Amino acid sequence: MIADAAKPATTSPLEDVLSVTDRGLYCAAGDFYVDPQRPVDHAVVTHAHTDHARWGCRRYLAASDSEHLLRMRMNKDAEFQFLPYGETITIRGVRVSFHPAGHMLGSAQVRIEHRGRVAVAMGDYKLDADPTCADWEPVRCHLMITESTFGLPIYRWKPNDVTAGEINDWWRANRDAGRCSVLYGYAVGKSQRLLAMLDPAIGPIFTHGAVEKGVAAYRDTGVGLPPTRYVGAVEGKPDWSGAMVVAVPSAHGTPWMRRFGKVSTAMASGWMAVRGARRRRALDRGFVVSDHVDWPSLIEAVNTCDPETLWVTHGYSAVVARYFQSQGRHAVVIDGRSRSEEEDEASSSSSSDREDSE
């Protein structure tokens, strides 16, 4: 079902609904920021990844499904308010509601309505089905803010069940060869999605400590995942051959890996669609698994929501804006970061913030 934007006779300019500031997207009428880039008094957040939910804000408003993740990751003295998908809260005359974004557990599009004008901040999103989070729902609007992380025609994802089959076949082959499989995925969101794709009949599944924290939050929210064991809780010197270990990318090549003996390593990321990404990391395999929209899905999302104005950010924003301009849409780039800059940061950094990203 598509949520329609109300269009009464009296309207206000889009700039009265949202504007771009050095602290992020700002709603002046409601005096709040959406995914602020620095600590602010009132943050409305799309999801619990730390490049969207900034540590140090005084108050957080988010979708209910993100509660366990946000409380786990944010400052303890913060005030939290959580809202179920589809319910509306009014902040100083501004109507705010959350709608599923399909990116990860608790991810949401933020619908903001003021004096008849509707803006939707998409955050990170995908249209593919995912058993670990609510599916994306289109929301009609006057202004749509979209990411463009994989905004090039070369990025087209396979169906989830096809990729799951590839991962399980790789694990099964490693088991038969007496190897331990180590699958890298970002700590919160991606790793839990990967766990849901695994066939526990192949062998035991273990998790890195950073992954295990997210697993606990997912289970506490009611998401079904296969049985797992935290690597750090395993005593003695077990035989790891045939096991699957889901770990964060920064574990690759570290002393932590030595305990597993003979291993085969793989990375699950949208960047694995580009062969060079796998070569740079010296991996045995790469699986294309992304929690962001690919090129066809990005076009579908924009055309379905049908905004008057499109703001493009985070990724190949200039390319995406030009494409939609060529289709007759009013599309504007609202950031200055190029894709190459973000790729360089992602490949050179091992911080928890980068491990949240695609």
Image (cartoon, rainbow, N blue to C red):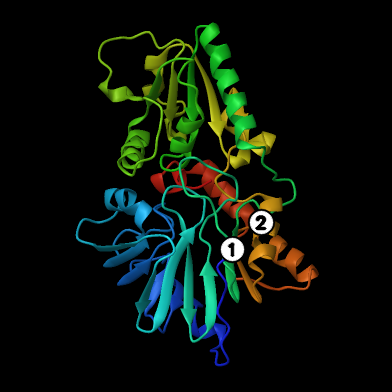
Q: Is residue 192 left or right of residue 116?
A: left
Q: Amino acid at mark 2?
A: Leu
Residue, far front: 1
Residue in the image at 33% along x and 44% along y: 221
The 10 Å Cα crowd at callout 2, few under 14, some 14 to 19, many 20 or more, is many
Q: From this viewpoint, which residue is outermost toward the right?
A: 326
Q: Which secondary structure, mark 1?
A: strand
**Depth order, front residue of 223/207:** 223
Q: Residue at 31% across / 53% down in the picture? A: 67
Q: Are marks 1 and 2 in contact (CB under 8 Å)?
A: yes
Indicate the amino acid at tag 1.
Thr
Which residue is identified by label 1? 146
Asked whether, in this view, residue 115 is left or right of residue 61, the answer is right
Q: Position of residue 227 (x, y in %)?
A: 37, 25
State the CA–CA distance, disc 1 to disc 2: 8 Å
Residue 225 visible (yes or no): yes
Where residue 226 sits, quadrant-wise, is top left
Where's residue 116, x and y in %?
A: 52, 84
Say which label, 1 or 2, has the lower sequence index. Answer: 1
Where is residue 224 shown, x and y percent of the image? 40, 35
